[in-house]
Amino acid sequence: MKSVNQAFLLASLAFINCPVLALDTDSKQPMYIEADSATYDEGKGVTEYRGNVRYSQGSVESVSDKMIVYQKDGKTHKVEAFGKPTRIKQTPEPGKPDWHGLGLRSEYFPETSVLILYEKAMAWQGDNPETSNRVTSEKIQYDIKNSVMKAGVPSKGGDRVRVTLQPEKADESQ
């Protein structure tokens, strides 16, 4: 159990060492959403996008089958996406590898800057999850403002957090 906690901590630190999910300018950029169809319910403050949904804001990109945007008093308070899987990508800072996340469902809460990936969730940084440090679980939660990642669903017993840490590459310049 101790080695699992240490491995998770090391993987979390690997993600946190690069300011995951946070180019300072992203939240100041306009949001763009494309979909095959959209339905807006003004009374509920809900917009539902369906079919090949593509979302971008600054360096953030997301692809899903369906996205629901919940608004109250003109502000977005929750964005929920569904896919097989839904995919999220963001550049943490110029020159650093992109951060990637996927799951069958995701929730994002702009007011608290919390992103949650659910069901067959995976997070990694770099081009290929097979050759990158990665975390897989049924739930991965990332608090962007505080750089805190949590994974796992304690009440589900059999679902385990899985961490893969790649060996450091040797410095070939020496």
Image (spheres, rainbow, N blue to C red):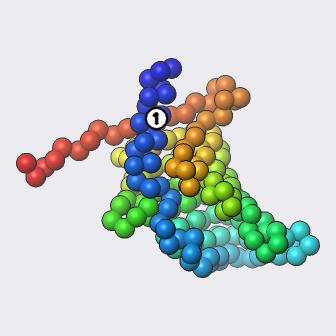
Report whether 37 appears left or right of 103. Answer: right
The image shows residue 26 at horizontal and vertical percentages of 53, 71
The structure residue drawn at horizontal position 53% and vertical position 67%, both measured from the top left corner, is 60
Q: For numbered disc 1, what is the local secondary structure? A: helix
The image shows residue 102 at horizontal and vertical percentages of 56, 53
Question: How many numbered discs, if any?
Answer: 1
Report whether 90 appears left or right of 14. Answer: right
- Quarter of the image where one finds residue 70: bottom right
Q: Is residue 46 among what the camera can see?
A: no
Q: Residue furthest left?
A: 174
Nearer to me, 7 or 120: 7
Report whether 162 appears left or right of 170. Answer: right
Q: Is residue 116 among what the camera can see?
A: yes
The structure residue drawn at horizontal position 16% and vertical position 47%, both measured from the top left corner, is 171
- Quarter of the image where one finds residue 51: bottom right
Nearer to me, 77 or 131: 77
The image shows residue 66 at horizontal and vertical percentages of 71, 64
Residue type highlighted by circle 1:
Leu
- Quarter of the image where one finds residue 127: bottom left
Q: Is residue 92 above or below residue 131?
A: below
Disc 1 packing (10 Å; few <14; some 14–19; many ≥20):
some
The image shows residue 12 at horizontal and vertical percentages of 46, 41
